[in-house]
Image (cartoon, helix red, strand yellow):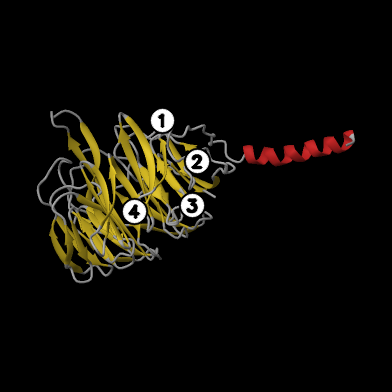
Amino acid sequence: MTKKKLFINFLLVLAFIYPCAADDGLLSSSTGTPVAGSDISASTESAVFPKLLWEKKLSKPITSSAISKDGTKIAIADETGYLTLYDTKGKKLWAYRYYGELPKRTLEFQSDKSDTIFFDVKFSGGGKYIIADLRVLNTWTDFRGFGKTEEYEPYIKIFLDKDGKLLWQTLKEGRHFIGGDEYVLIQSWSGDESDTNPLDYYLLDTRGQLLFTGKTNGDSLRCYGFSEDGRYLFLDNKIIECKSGRSVWEIKSGLFEGINKNHAVVVNKGGGEVYNFTTRTKLLNIRNTSFFSITNKHIAGIQSEQGKVFLTVHEIETGRLVWRRQSYPEPTPGGDERLLYLTKDSMRLFLGGVKSLILYNSHGGEIWRLPVIIKPNGNFDYYSLTENGEFVLFGYDRAVRLYKSF
């Protein structure tokens, strides 16, 4: 081969490498080590880095952000008091602000903050509706009687359609979730995470009509929600059919954490169990695991063992361990994880913590790692993903970024 041809080939290689390495300066590669003795081996797939599609810099801190499951709509709320909807190209579709009556408050000084903000914004399964908490600014004196603090406190929930039209509002307070495009769950707040007093819950339809209400066994941070298709509601140790309000399954020990078609996850002090929802047959027992994501065929979990933390993926019907690897440096055994999500096709697993968001492939190999900086405060709303994991929305402080994972 002539020197001229060698030089041309060298230039072609450089032209290929340079754009790949410079695509996003926020990203860094990882050299994570698989767990010895497990089924996992180092990934042979080429590293793929998420592409930053756009970034929104805001004048006020973000209060909530979310992307619809199909990836067509993005909602951003901040301390200007507006809830704004965008498409995935970053084009503004509409903005909504509440101008209704506000409750009486104690405001002892002029604030540069908005009187209202939107918090905990969620899309319905098909993206037809949006629900959010409307909170109002108030002034409080601390418990010692010294100093004044500004605080946004819950007031009402609002329910909008995809065009930003207010459909209804309610004074019921608590966590909320939408089942499919048909049902809304509101679970009352608890004053303390260790509180075991019964809590009220309400199931409404998307017209705002109350279908039924009841009481849970106590405060459950994650043990409430809907099945994947929205037909069933799980609350603590019960599964309820939404259409009839009938309790179809109640267990004596443990709490339900998820339902996906024929599979239900039960968590207890020893770990987690997967049952066939139809036959009530136990299919799988996963010890020392307390945080799960379930699909129709697989279940992922965060497992603690001898002071170390592992990621695991099991095949439900056979019980086979598909892969396991040590998670380092996040999440810690103290539990600072913010996200564990196994995509619908079970081909990718997302792990989000206070320092990074990591994507793993179906063999447990790390595809990419996105460094982030989050101050731990118990908020799980920094990350928002589409159903198949193609788009990742990350909102923190005064910026919102949309990434394309693959």
Task: Name the amino acid, label 1.
Answer: Pro
Name the residue nearer the viewer: 277 or 56: 277
Residue 380: mark in rendering: none
* Mark 4 crowdedness (10 Å alpha carbons): few <14, some 14-19, many ≥20: many
The span from disc 1 to disc 3 (Cα, nearest Å) is 24 Å
How many numbered marks are there?
4
List the residue tagged with mark 4. 121
* Horizontal side of residue 351 vs 245, given as left or right: right
The residue mark sitting in front, 4 or 2, is 2
Q: In the rendered image, which quarter is residue 398 located in?
A: top left
Task: Name the amino acid, label 4.
Answer: Val
Q: Residue furthest left?
A: 197
Marked residue nearer the N-terminal end (1 or 3): 1
The residue mark sitting in front, 4 or 3, is 3
List the residue tagged with mark 1. 329
**Taking 329 as reference, is 198 above or below it?**
below
**Taking 64 as reference, is 277 above or below it?**
below
The residue mark sitting in front, 1 or 4, is 1
* Mark 1 crowdedness (10 Å alpha carbons): few <14, some 14-19, many ≥20: few
List the residue tagged with mark 3. 391
Tag 1 and tag 3, C-beta contact below 8 Å: no
